[in-house]
Image: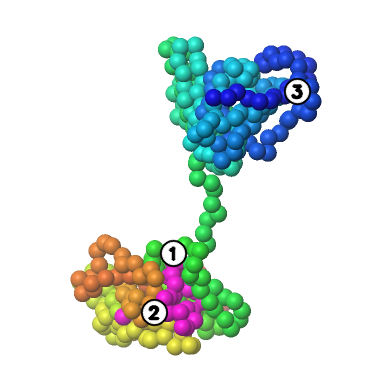
Amino acid sequence: MKKKTKKSLLFLALGAICIVPTMAFGQVTTSCPDCSHVVPYFKGPGGLIATTDGADEVVYLATCGNVVRSGTLTASTNGTVAMSFVDENIVCDENNASLEIGPITDGGWYWLTGATNSAVGSLVNKSILNNTRIMPTNPGSSVTILEGNGANFLEHPASGRIGILPTIVPEPPVDPLGSCGAYRVDEDTIKQKSSDCALGDGSAYVRVEGPGNYGRRTPITNGMISRNYTGDVTVKINLWSNGGVVSTDTTSTPIGTGYRNLGDSLSLSQVVIEGPSPSVTLEDVLGDANASSSQTVVEGTADNSGDHVIVTIEGADSSDYCTDSRSQNTTISIYLVSNSDTEDNLLPAVKALSGSMPSTLQAVHGKTTLTIKCPPPSANKGQNLVPSNPFPTDRNG
């Protein structure tokens, strides 16, 4: 194997240095644009071996404190280059030393020689030096850890053992993919992103809306609704996607994929409501309008944004539930079954929930509870809230 063909040396400042060179005249190299790899921890005697990237020779740049040395290595007939740090006069005992080399391919390795043992490590591609670093487990005071540029040097003084531990994640950082699904182009146009994006897991959530201001419906976010003393209360229940869903029907706008404000809710085939216990019927809780646990699904139209159910809660004056002998609150369980897989050609399919479900349903895709509160006594019609005067005054007496 041939030795280097040229090298140069630069004294950057006065002071103690670790390399003892001979003076070199001519152009001095302080950077290495052709260097593709680094020795991640460079200190002490050792050497390296690597395969060139098709070049006849490679260059190296060694920095030790305030001294820089550069040189070239000629490739052998099989394309490999090797060097001894001692032979190249680049052995360094400084903590801020570095060694670059290139152009070479990945797979090169190097070794460091200690007093009684040697350690081997991989040459690191410079393109991953900004990747996430990992911290090695702290072994305590028995092992010394010295940090390098992509690897740490470990030494166990009691036994003389040494090691080189990589600390850099080899894969380059990748920007996270955005979510697949529907997005708005303008006021009248909705499209869907179906490539270079991340699909969701098909999970969905139940949305319950109750009376709001000015006759509008508003989401019920605390899971509770109050019963009117007089007159019914109605709530609207539907099922929406948690995101990452696309429709494989590319001939139409992606409605029905379950995105709020970007299309319809998910299609429904069945909705079942159960009371708080077998001894309390749904008719007891909701009134005659909801005597059956199986609810009627209202198919979606352009005006109501997808399939839903309307649940009517009877007023306290018509209900037998809000009496002195009953609790002020009762909770119903709501189960929704979606058929969006076949109706809307969704990918991924709507995810079925696990756990205890009604035996009448083969799969449940959305579940929630709604606590119905009886009105407070102060809301009872005709109740006198002003007590009689405990201190009557006889103005005639």
Instruction: Indicate the secondary structure of the residue bearing disc 3.
Output: strand
- Name which residue type carries label 1: Leu
- Name which residue type carries label 3: Leu
Instruction: Indicate the secondary structure of the residue bearing disc 2.
Output: loop
Name the residue: 39% across, 79% down. 344
Indicate whether 301 appears above or below 86.
below
Mark 3 or mark 2, whichever is nearer to me:
3
Question: Which disc is residue 199 wearing?
Answer: 1
Quadrant of residue 52 in the image? Answer: top right
Name the residue: 49% across, 88% down. 303
Indicate whether 320 appears above or below 203.
below
Instruction: Please provide percent x and percent y for residue 7.
Output: 69, 24
Quadrant of residue 328 in the image? Answer: bottom left
Question: Magenta: predominant secondary structure element?
Answer: loop
Of the two numbered discs 3 and 1 on the same chain, state the one appearing first in sequence: 3
Q: Is residue 267 magenta?
A: yes
- Name which residue type carries label 2: Asp
Q: Identify residue for label 3.
A: 10
Screen quadrant of the N terminus: top right
